[in-house]
Image: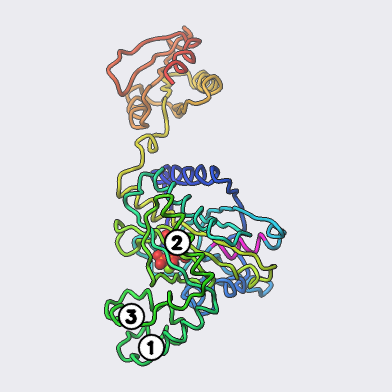
């Protein structure tokens, strides 16, 4: 569980704002819900035999003896909140949320125990148009962030749960006959969650799967049409994608469309965004049947990618435009002058020196702050109602102005 230090938080804010802006342009609204839920909710939503529920949740009994868990993902809580508040009855919802998620995994690059996601969910629309819209949103976001050249889209269709049950049986038959050639992990999954074997990282297992029955031969006509229409929109919108028949995703609730945006720039943890359709989930959690589709982006991984590609604008790290140097017995005037400037010039970011010290040490701090201008207030300036203006990043000579003219100068420069 990482601390996020001020040096990194600017990039996080830049990313979060960019995402919020794009989502607002598509008319998605923010929803907030607790980071703790009944453990039962996640068991029912994510699935009893998934890695998350079997071994990754932070669960505990509260003082009433109820089992609660820190949320390992957002969709379950989002569905619970929407159902409880009547947001899904005879209406559509386009929603997003952000915040920490918790999974007791092995920590490594791009994999933490407290990590952060921005999740997007759309409810009440069962056609492929909304699946496509979600992919348009993500594609636009990658362009906005200038990382579109570094991510690729993989999509697949999982069909309905009936399709998957038939397929699962065929897959298990095939793999059972080759039980000895599977690694221990896949042997275990063969009993608990055989479809997860499809995304095994073991090359021998992958080779074995080449001749295995393929899910796409098992999905019904409606799912197939849905998938083809989705592909048609992506083609028309010029969004490149790869159909990956082995993409199955780790959570049980998906049906029909599933997708991942992956990058090769981050090593093994290359999925920066993942999601899919989950038409049965709302009902499974006790609501009236309501189709849903959504995705989640991993903020840490996106930040790593932004840094790796060097695409965060320089201005993002810069937090202050002006630094007010206050030398001598002028603290009071300095604070009031600074505050008046903030009133007059709404857009400036101004740090007012506090705590005294020599001119030299304050100028050093001004330089280190990244400000482009140091405003200098000494006892002489304070008495005369003037202020020194020293340009820290350009070759313009220092000047002295009446304090009353300062706002005008700053506004003209902005
Ligand atoms: P992975 O296969 O990479 O573990 P996942 O299928 O478990 O991903 P999801 O549950 O779909 O992931 O979560 C969506 C996104 O959240 C992932 O694509 C990833 O960017 C991010 N994510 C998931 N788990 C972690 C983690 N432990 N640390 C950091 N980011 C994570
Ligand atoms: Mg995972």
Q: Would residue 277 be seen by someone viewing this image from the given angle?
A: yes
- Viewer-side residue, 49 vs 325: 49
In the image, residue 101 lies in the stretch drawn in magenta: no
Say what secondary structure mark 2 lies in: strand
Q: Is mark 2 within 8 Å of ligand 1?
A: yes
Category of crowding for the residue at label 2, using alpha-carbon neighbours closer than 10 angstroms: few (below 14), some (14–19), many (at least 20) = many
Residue in view at x 48 percent, y 65 percent? 227
Q: Residues within 10 Å of mark 3 (few under 14, many from 20)?
A: some
Q: Which residue is mark 3?
A: 209
- In primary-sequence order, the first of circles 1 and 2 is 1
Image quadrant containing the N terminus: bottom left
Residue 113 seen from this side: no
Q: CA distance from mark 1 to mark 2?
A: 29 Å
In the rendered view, does 292 fall on the left or right side of 270?
right
Q: Is residue 272 above or below residue 55?
A: above
**Mark 3 falls on what kind of element?**
helix
Q: Position of residue 177 (x, y in %)?
A: 36, 92
Q: Secondary structure at mark 1?
A: helix
User: Which residue position holds label 1?
Assistant: 174
Q: Which residue is mark 2?
A: 274
Read off the magenta span: 74-82
Question: Percent from the top left, x then y, of residue 101?
Answer: 50, 61
């Amino acid at each position: 569980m990482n601390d996020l230090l001020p040096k990194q938080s600017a990039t996080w804010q830049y990313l979060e704002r960019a995402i919020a802006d794009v989502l607002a342009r598509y008319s998605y609204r923010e929803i907030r819900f607790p980071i703790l839920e009944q453990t039962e909710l996640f068991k029912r939503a994510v699935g009893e035999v998934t890695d998350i529920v079997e071994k990754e949740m932070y669960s505990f009994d509260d003082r009433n003896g109820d089992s609660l868990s820190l949320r390992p993902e957002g969709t379950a809580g989002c569905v619970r909140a929407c159902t409880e508040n009547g947001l899904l009855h005879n209406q559509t919802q386009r929603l997003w949320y952000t915040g920490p998620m918790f999974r007791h995994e092995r920590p490594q690059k791009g994999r933490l125990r407290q990590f952060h996601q921005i999740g997007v969910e759309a409810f009440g629309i069962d056609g492929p148009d909304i699946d496509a819209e979600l992919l348009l949103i993500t594609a636009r976001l990658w362009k906005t962030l200038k990382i579109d050249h570094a991510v690729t889209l993989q999509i697949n269709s999982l069909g309905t749960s009936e399709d998957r049950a038939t397929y699962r049986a065929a897959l298990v038959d095939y793999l059972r006959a080759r039980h000895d050639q599977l690694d221990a992990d896949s042997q275990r999954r063969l009993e608990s969650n055989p479809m997860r074997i499809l995304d095994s990282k073991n090359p021998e297992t992958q080779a074995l799967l080449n001749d295995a029955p393929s899910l796409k031969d098992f999905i019904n006509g409606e799912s197939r049409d849905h998938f083809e229409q989705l592909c048609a929109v992506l083609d028309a919108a010029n969004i490149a994608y790869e159909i990956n028949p082995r993409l199955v995703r780790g959570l049980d609730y998906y049906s029909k469309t599933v997708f991942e945006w992956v990058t090769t720039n981050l090593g093994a943890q290359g999925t920066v965004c993942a999601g899919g359709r989950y038409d049965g989930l709302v009902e499974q959690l006790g609501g009236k049947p309501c189709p849903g589709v959504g995705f989640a982006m991993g903020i840490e991984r996106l930040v790593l990618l932004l840094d790796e590609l060097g695409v965060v604008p320089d201005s993002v790290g810069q937090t202050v435009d002006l630094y007010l140097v206050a030398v001598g017995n002028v603290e009071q005037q300095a604070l009031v002058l600074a505050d008046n400037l903030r009133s007059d010039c709404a857009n400036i970011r101004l740090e007012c020196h506090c705590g005294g010290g020599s001119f030299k040490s304050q100028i050093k701090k001004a330089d280190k702050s990244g400000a482009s201008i140091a405003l200098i207030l000494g006892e002489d300036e304070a008495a005369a109602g003037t202020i020194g203006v020293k340009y820290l990043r350009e070759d313009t000579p220092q000047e002295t102005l009446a304090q009353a003219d300062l706002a005008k100068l700053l506004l003209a420069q902005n």
